[in-house]
Image (cartoon, rainbow, N blue to C red):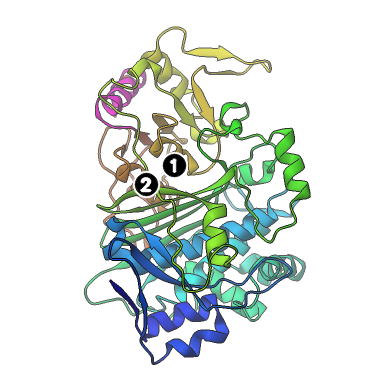
Amino acid sequence: MTLLTRGSPKLAAIAAVLLPSSAAAFGGRCHSLHVSASVRTLSVLRVRGGSSSSSTDHPYLPISLPDTFEERQEDVHVALLSVLHASRVTRHLQPIGSSDIQTLSKKDASPVTVGDFASQAVALHTIHNTFANSDMYIAEEGSDALRNDEDLLEKVWGAVNHVHKGDLNSKQDLLKAIDYGQGIGEEYQPSLSKRRVWALDPIDGTKGFLRGRELGGQYCIALALIEDGEVQVSCLGCPNLPLPSTESTKVIPYGAWSENEVKDDTSNSSNGLFSSSRGCLFVAVRGGGCYEIPLHILEQCLLGHTAAENSIADLPWKRLHVTANDGTAKLKHEATFCLGVERGFSDPKGTVLEIARVIHGPDALIVDDDGITDIKNSLRLDGQGKYGLLARGDAEYFLRLPKDGYVDWVWDVAAGFLCLNEAGGKMSDVNGNAIDFSDIGKGRKAKLPDHVKGIFGSNGGTFHDELVRAYAEVNGSDD
């Protein structure tokens, strides 16, 4: 096949994001790359390099995408780049072992960090340069705190330029990029055919981010594209999540670093920020499946560390499937729960523990060394990376039951929703009803419907039915 990178405004904008000096070359020309007919490719421009070097040499780096993504190549292209950029800047900023980073508190007492602002700036800048005023952007943070705190602004600006040099030209550009997510500073001209909304959580799991890398603190960059109320593309970048079957997937706390990993990180002198044992990216397209790829491989390809000129980087995409829900792999009483660390938020009443007792039986719970009761067969981590673990079969049950009256924001749910569904799993409210995204973006609506009192995720089938049944039993009503 011949892959054409057409001289369109959108592709010229992509060029500007990834290699500003080459943007003009895309303005009015049609470039072709001849590749094997068996490979679906996406022409990706070189990303500027690590903290002390810049990219040179060849301007293009084609990469393979799954065949099932063919109809969404441009959207996937932009989502991958956006989340990769944000993953790199947050990986650079995540403290090693403690909350050694400036934080603020929002009205709901949740923390926001330099990493949240830096991540949102680079992610939305990347998307907006391609889909400027035709798409809507809904994201968690605004720039007011930075505009009122020059020291904090300087830290965010320094972090962005340390990892992502050359794309944001000034602090005003950075502030403007952050505010795209609040609908400020954009001239939104919606498409006549579709309502396209990009929903971003720049750091989902900020408290995990603050726990630090070596303690296994988990967080993710969660991005979803919603068209006319249907999630079409999603991407979860999980910079500190262990790769499947590695040593850190078997320890408590989940994902904590081994001594060897600490040594390797200290001695690493390459420009790449991700190791070969952790850092995962999950990407899904509606009807096209969910795939996983190590962040270090994607980073190496996009930075040009391993690709020869004019070659195609045939990436090792792994299509994901949840644990079989017909009982051949596990029985329901053997299922692993994947839950949040912050129980005061995700399970303030202890309902999840009682649900586990119903499903797993009287021996479901244990008391740890600190005297805290927990589910014996469970993993605990922050952020939507939990959906990635369910998608790749590392766990079977996810529950999120916040306090009465709390309604989830779309950025906390949409990206994980599609990854789980496309891997064969299921997400619903506590009564088993499908999550309704139909009003997202109407009048900049960014919350789920008020009747959604909690979120259940599972590997589907009778496993999901069991979750809903157990909740009804514990709750004592049909709610």
Label 2 CA crowd tier, 10 Å (few <14, some 14–19, many 20+): many
Residue 106: in sight, yes or no? yes
Callout 2: SS: helix
Residue shown at the point (32%, 62%) measured from the top left: 39
Image location (x, y in percent) of residue 71: 26, 64
Residue 335: give x, y in percent of width and height: 39, 22
- Left or right, residue 15 beside residue 4: right
Which amino acid type is shown beneath numbered disc 1? Answer: Gly
Q: Could you tell whether 471 is left or right of 178 in the image?
A: left
Q: Are marks 2 and 1 in contact (CB under 8 Å)?
A: yes
Question: Which label belongs to residue 388?
Answer: 1
Quarter of the image with the N terminus is bottom left
**How far apart are labels 2 and 1 at the CA level?**
7 Å
Farthest residue in the left direction?
A: 193
The tag earlier along the polypeptide, 2 or 1, is: 1
Q: Is residue 134 above or below residue 401?
A: below
